[in-house]
Amino acid sequence: MPLHEVPGPAGTKGVRVPNRLIGEISPYLLQHAYNPVEWYPWGDAAFQRAREQDRPVFLSIGYSTCHWCHVMARESFEDDVIAALLNRVFICIKVDREERPDIDAFYMSVAQVLTGTGGWPLTIIMTPEREPFFAATYIPKESRFGSEGLLDLVPAIETFWKSQRIRDITKKITLALHGSQGTGAGSPATGRLLHAGYHDLELRFDAINGGFSGAPKFPAPHTISFLLRYWKRTGKKNALAMAEKTLQSMSQGGIYDHIGFGFHRYSTDSRWLVPHFEKMLYDQALLVTAFTEAYLATGNKSYRTTAEECLTYLIRDMRDPAGGFYSAEDADSEGIEGKFYLWKKDEIGQVLGDEAPFFTRVYQVKAEGNYIAQETGHRKGDNILLLAAPLSQLASIARLPEEEFVAGISRAKEHLFTTRKDRVPPLKDDKVLTDWNGLVISAFSYAACAFGDNRYLEAATGAADFILGTMKLGTGELFHRYREGTAGIRGVASDYTYLCAGLLDLYELTFIPRYLEAAIGIENYFTNHFFDPRDGGYFTSHEDEADIPVRQKEIYDGAVPSVNSVALKNLVRLGLMTTNPDYHARAWKLARCFSTLAEQSPSGYTGFLSALDFALGPAASVLIVGDTGTPGMDAMKAVINSRFFPSVVVLQRPVGNGPFEIDRISGFTADMDESGGKTTAYACKNHVCDVPTNDPGILAESLEKMSNAENEENRKR
């Protein structure tokens, strides 16, 4: 084995022999390959060894850009005393949650059952039969302030293990996990659930700062998307106001990287001021979509600016040369959280010279600093950049033309960005994940439709072609992860749902049938191997996956919309696009499966509610007959893409007798053709189509009427 020189426990240099993680591909697992802990990767070998030696299993789940994972590693997993203790008592396993989200989801649900909370690093202790009996998140090395440290905890668990009282606990946990599944006996999902979700969010809304909780505050862009849909459905102005307040507060706050763009993972306070500095690919994708939707709904250009800046960040910093997008960037650089992103007032003065006073006033920079490090509690003159109001409003206060004001800010930010590039950057996790790339394909496709920028079209098609060419087998099965030229790890449910959604969005952008056909193939494979035909809904793992004790279904919408929330919307869209009733039947069964769970706390299921909004209608199908790239086609697409129509699907059929690929895929396009020799649109609702039109304005009116008819009924109730 190769030797590796690493800091020893006291910061001195020492020689370490790598453990079993050295042959892994995951950046997170490789970070732990030289720990003195004798880690195993997840697999049968570890559990077989635990059975042979009658030892419990210590499972540690994290990811490469997780700050507190780094803290626990430095404190404990790199410590010889703790390592010796863990190695004596346990068989130790490391899992990258981004590589194995199915394992992470199951054991996170265990943590929720046992502790009521969750997070990373996640620590699970289980039997060799993979039955958990202890869960925790970050555990310090030594006990302090009521938190038991590993030095005390591990001997206590060793004693408990020898007492043979484990079985009663594991049985109760397993029963509780089985009881968390949705059931086909649930009540039908109706519009009442949408109203309940809205009223729940009203009660939770932070009217001062935006958002729907105290500290810590997470972006939850699917909640914004639900509020925009609820506003569109009901005309409730407060739904739009809550969405806008939250978006504005986030884009002005410290959670946003004002220099290099992109959002940090969450805010540690209630004001969106101090972020947890890591940047996740899924956050960028979902927030781009939310800001783009808000722009289409309101016309507010600041939302477009934020969306485009995030897309700039993704193209510039997160795109693999092959076309896929990397997973994340760390919070830490040089071992210090946020160091890459923080500024001292004097440093800004040196970079900007005479422009510095203007810039530091706008971004609230102070000589004493506005940032207090979480771990030390001290202020060292460091500043997080944040705005007190939108730039347009600040320009008015400064009595400067908005264009001149914004141009000056942009110049200053470019100088600071150039200076920042000389700093040691945070670690980039360069693995490409199928599911998160599906979200990115959706974001770029939607933005390309809304903004008409070909760079976004190229990014969306590049990512889709890479995933389909590299991560998809001929059987229809997907791989989950790609890194260093190698695709591997069997796909999980989120890979199928998110990629299917991305391909549907990409088809509506490009009208290239192979993307729609690929989406259908992925959905069909997903249903064949993940769907529950008895109770409805989709399991997280493949039908023949043996790694997890309980096969679960996911519905709670956490940092990302759940698998079943996205699947519901996919099924409704495919039903409208193909007129195949099987999709609607599965959608109905899925919605019924989870409706009772969603009723218990509807604001925790806003991704599901957004999909339910689509399923309940009014939903419209638009077929445009005409050739792509023609003025008539561009005009028809523009009236749809420039408005917020969240419940519309769009298809295109070329001119002529056919048959065309779309006629084979869809059940209603074959008999439709141009009218009067011009590009023609057919707008249909509930299997009834309006009179075909060559006029983009009439198409827009027709779609507005289809939406507003239902809105009027809702307003009367």
Image (cartoon, rainbow, N blue to C red):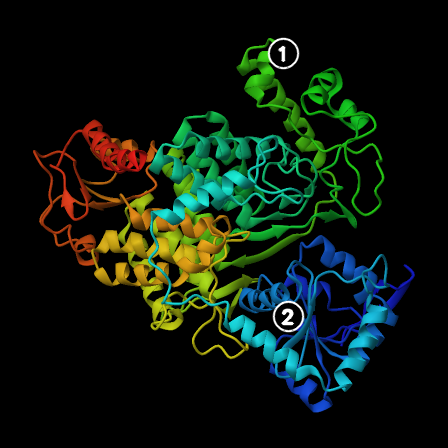
Badge 2 crowding class, 10 Å Cα cut-off, few under 14, some 14 to 19, many 20 or more, is: few
Viewer-closest of 312 and 152: 152
Residue kind at label 2, given as amino acid type: Glu
Residue occupying the far top of the picture: 399
Q: Residue 400, relative to residue 305: is it above or below?
A: above
Name the spot of residue 210 as percent of width and height, x first: 57, 34
Residue at which label 2 appears = 24
Judge from the rendering whether residue 69 lies leftward or rightward of residue 662; answer left or right.
right
Name the spot of residue 153 as percent of width and height, x first: 81, 71
Q: Residue 336, relative to residue 409: is it above or below?
A: below
The numbered dot on residue 242 is none
Q: Quadrant of the C terminus?
A: top left
**Count of numbered labels shown in the rendering:** 2
Residue at which label 1 appears = 398
Name the spot of residue 336 as percent of width and height, x first: 78, 47
Q: Residue at x 30, y 49 (%)?
A: 616
Viewer-closest of 308 and 237: 237
Residue mark closest to the camera, 1 vs 2: 1
Q: Residue at x 35, y 55 (%)?
A: 189
Marks 1 and 2, the one that precedes in the sequence: 2
Q: Secondary structure at mark 1?
A: helix
Quadrant for residue 250, please give it.
top right
Residue occupying the far bottom of the picture: 52
Judge from the rendering whether residue 358 lies leftward or rightward of residue 536; answer left or right.
right
Residue 289 visible, this angle: no
Q: Quadrant of the N terminus?
A: bottom right
